Amino acid sequence: MRALSSRCLFRFLIPAAVVLLIGWPRAQALQKITINYPTRSGASWPLYIAKDGGYYQKYGLDVELKFGVHPTERPAMREVFVAETREEAERIAAPAVTHLFKELYGKRSAKGERALTSDTGEVVSDHEQVDFANFKQRYIIGTPDDACEAVAQMRDELGTTELHCWMHMPGIAGEDAMRSARLFAREVIPAFPETKEA
């Protein structure tokens, strides 16, 4: 019986000695960070789920979720097609963008699902209102000079810092899209050299 008590005492004393020599394990200070999110939508839910579930703390983070970001970068996306002449560019690309905006976005707007407005600000209530002429300002379709003018306008008036180009829209043949992309790379991109901040 005495041997059993010694063993139990020994099992208690070793961990106690370790704690006395090393000290109680201390919780490490959490690294404070702020996560900014620009919209209140389902896309931001995982940020809150992770916070409420304790996942940030589990990995050593004290997270503040902050709505209303004013980013320094301002990207934009445009449908882009360039050709040697404006007529050629519109002949190839106008049917593609018109179909996309009429059949997809125009029909949704007519149903009240997502408002689509023309260049004049009129909300589309019937998808037949959508044609190339009424929506021309939302695309970059024309010559390389037209594209340079449109990109410069976006940069100067909207503060656009980068442009994402959708260059192969449904209905445009692959070889036409490649020819347009090469022309854009050769004549438009060099007109906008990257500027470095001091």
Image (tube, rainbow, N blue to C red):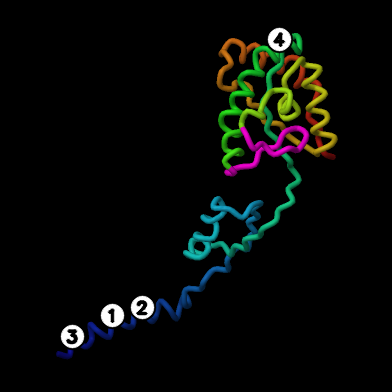
The amino acid type, in three-letter code, at marker 3 is Leu
Which residue is disc 1 drawn over? Answer: 11
Q: Quadrant of residue 104?
A: top right
Tell me whether circle 1 and circle 2 mark residues in contact (CB < 8 Å).
yes
Q: Mark 1: give few (<14), some (14-19) or many (20+) Cα within 10 Å.
A: few
Location of residue 5 in the rendering, given as x and y in whole percent from the top left corner: 21, 88
Tell me whether circle 4 and circle 2 mark residues in contact (CB < 8 Å).
no
Which residue is disc 3 drawn over? Answer: 4
Give the mark, 3 or 4, whose residue is nearer the N terminus.
3
The amino acid type, in three-letter code, at marker 2 is Pro
Q: Mark 2: give few (<14), some (14-19) or many (20+) Cα within 10 Å.
A: few
Viewer-side label of 1, 4: 4
The amino acid type, in three-letter code, at marker 1 is Arg
Q: Mark 4: give few (<14), some (14-19) or many (20+) Cα within 10 Å.
A: some
Residue at 64% in and 37% down: 125
Which residue is disc 2 drawn over? Answer: 15
Residue at 28% in and 80% down: 11
SS assignment for the magenta stretch, majority: loop
Q: Quadrant of the C terminus?
A: top right
Q: Is residue 67 above or below residue 150?
A: below
As measured in the structure, the alpha-carbon distance from the residue carrying label 1 to the one carrying label 3 is: 11 Å
Quick check: is 24 in the magenta stretch? no
Location of residue 6 in the rendering, given as x and y in whole percent from the top left corner: 23, 86
Give the mark, 1 or 4, whose residue is nearer the N terminus.
1
Residue at 62% in and 34% down: 126
SS at mark 4 in the image: helix
The amino acid type, in three-letter code, at marker 4 is Glu
Q: Is residue 82 above or below residue 134?
A: above
